[in-house]
Image (cartoon, rainbow, N blue to C red):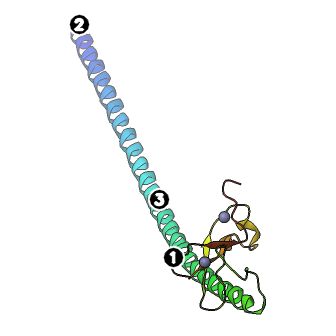
Amino acid sequence: MAKLRRRLAAAKDALAEAQAAMKRAEATYDAATEAEQAQGAAREYRARAREARQAHERAAATVARLQRRVNALTRHRIRDLVAGWARSGLTGGPYPKRCRNGHEWGPGRMLVTWKRCSCPGAQTLHPDQAIWGHFIVACRERGCRSVWYDPPHEPGG
Ligand SMILES: [Zn+2]
Ligand SMILES: [Zn+2]
């Protein structure tokens, strides 16, 4: 009988050991599965991130292209505006007949330019914010630094 008990105890020990081994294997399997799922999720996440980055790059390129187009058109419109403004000056137009120092202004005697500005005065020049600024008439008389702004510049306003 004692012999049989010993064999039974040994068999129980072996069973317990096998069960423990099975649990360890199970845990390893679970961990591996989790790792695999995590890897899959990470792969998917990386793919989505790559797609998002590519979409952003495409959008940024479009924005840059449109911005260049807007800038070119704005420069063009400003050139037109300056030319029209200067022409209107020929027929009793928007600028004074003389500079502050008394030099007569007219074709060839003045230089008309445009300068971007966002002071309150400049904002009245045009509804489009891209064209906020002033027409500037500079006297071309040698040594004269008289400059006239239209609309009037309002620094710090
Ligand atoms: Zn002058
Ligand atoms: Zn201004």
- Quarter of the picture holding the N terminus: top left
Tell me where residue 97 sits by quadrant: bottom right
Tell me where residue 121 sits by quadrant: bottom right
Q: In screen coordinates, is 139 left or right of 58?
A: right
Q: Distance between the residues labelled 3 and 2?
A: 69 Å
Residue 32 location, x and y as percent? 35, 43
What residue is shown with label 2? 2
Nearest the eye: 53 or 153: 153
Residue 144 location, x and y as percent? 55, 75
**Closer to the eye: label 2 or 1:** 1
| Residue behind label 2 places its C-beta within 8 angstroms of ligand 2 | no
- Residue 49 got which mark? 3
Q: Which amino acid does label 2 sit on?
A: Ala
- Residue 72 got which mark? none
Which of disc 1 and disc 2 is earlier in sequence?
A: 2
Q: What residue type is labelled 3?
A: Ala
Q: Which residue is drawn at 66% across and 57% down?
A: 155
What residue is shown with label 1? 143
